[in-house]
Image: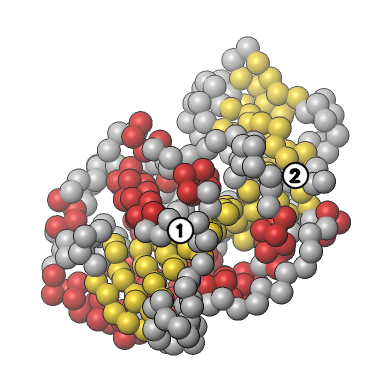
Amino acid sequence: MTNDNKFTAQDLTDINSANFCQAYQQFVKAGDFIALTRQFEHGFAQTGRDNQLSFIVKQAKVSLLDTGILLVEPENSAMLGKPSKSIVISSGIHGNETAPIEIVQQLISDILAEKVQVKHRTLLIMGNPVAMNIAKRFQTENLNRLFSGKHQNITPCYEKFRAERIEGYVSDFFNADKSTDVTNYHYDLHTAIRNSKHEKFAIYPYQGDKPWNKEQLSFMAACGVNTILFGHGPTGTFSYFSSAQFKAHAFTVELGKVRPFGENNMANFQAMTDKLTALVSDKDLALQEFDNKNFNLFTALGDITKVSDNFELFIDDAASNFTDYPVDTLLSTDTNQEYRTTQKGESIVFPNANVGNGQRAVLMVVPTTLT
């Protein structure tokens, strides 16, 4: 990798094949997908979308498609039945969000140790290995703003390359089985920069004219996530890409606060791990019927956008996500404009003044219910 953060195709070929083969065999034996992904952060010339490395585990074909991209396909047998779900479980789109990466690692470890029999096609992703290795959200560009083709509008960098590759793999995955009785799912797991009044929450991508799926909300609650923010428009996020392009049931799931590798209390994510395991192995999910009183539901009012270098944000650095402010509270100023709250219960999510001009600095939300 060059020192100026510019990514080129040459980075894919500067890898010792003997080292890769040894690391791959170690992964097959021990199941440490984090180690393999971090060691070959830019990919490996031996594999690609047309040249997979595969092996069989408990009546399922496991294929390494690329660094951080693992496909598990169950046999279509009389005992297992025909898979009726195509499931994407992604993590590490921001490299310093380690708990989701460790959740995906646990799923992979259990599959390779034959503790879990996968009965539905599953694509497991660790999204930004370069950022994982430098313990940052991203190297050059925010990867979770580059999907749905938005990567086409930026200068060459690792995240541009990675967004293109990931879109390709996910498209191939969902397009591989277009039968009408197959349902698509995508759970993109994250942790947040700052604390939250509701520790775990999920963003349900904008659905257009489609209704919000209450069974999926019940699934989120069973995963330990009962705070839901309903999206208000198209975005460049990974979950919106799957939802809009492939009609997947999809969520961006925030599971707490960012912590370094090894410092996560994984017991805090056991419900999520258990339900994702049950989903891919076709176990009973034991979902409760949706009831508004069991949820904290929010709808988006819109964004506070940083327009110029004159932007000022009047939100304390220690303020938690979902902090609400009285009506007529001044939250920001910019060139010839200001933002004041206008509704009771108006709250902040993802406040960040250190964004580029033209980017969202705060998402504003208010409580809501579903009928």
Residue 102 seen in the current view: no
Q: Identify whether 339 is placed above or below 74.
A: above
Of helix, strand and loop, which one carries label 2? strand
Relative to 94, is 24 on the left or the right? left
- Name the spot of residue 160 as percent of width and height, x first: 33, 42
The residue lying at 52 percent from left, 21 percent from top is: 308
Q: Element type at marker 1?
A: loop
Query: How far apart are the alpha carbons under marks 2 and 1?
Result: 34 Å
Q: Nearer the viewer, residue 14 or 245?
A: 245
Residues marked 2 and 1 touching at CB (< 8 Å): no
Mark 2 residue crowding within 10 angstroms, few (<14) / some (14–19) / many (20+) = many
**Is residue 50 placed above or below 267 in the rendered structure?**
above
Tell me if 50 is positioned left or right of 240 in this view: left
Q: Which residue is mark 1?
A: 179
Q: Is residue 147 visible?
A: yes
Amino acid tagged 2: Phe
Q: Residue at x 39, y 38 (%)?
A: 149
Query: In the rendered image of this protein, does residue 122 appear above or below residue 157?
Result: below
- Residue at the disc numbered 2: 298
The residue depicted at 56 percent of the width and 33 percent of the height is 360
Q: Nearer the viewer, residue 144 or 304?
A: 144
The label number, if any, that marks residue 278 in the structure image: none
Colour treatment of the image: secondary structure
Q: Amino acid at mark 1?
A: Ser
**Residue 263 % position (x, y):** 54, 71
Tell me where residue 75 appears, x and y as whole percent. 39, 78
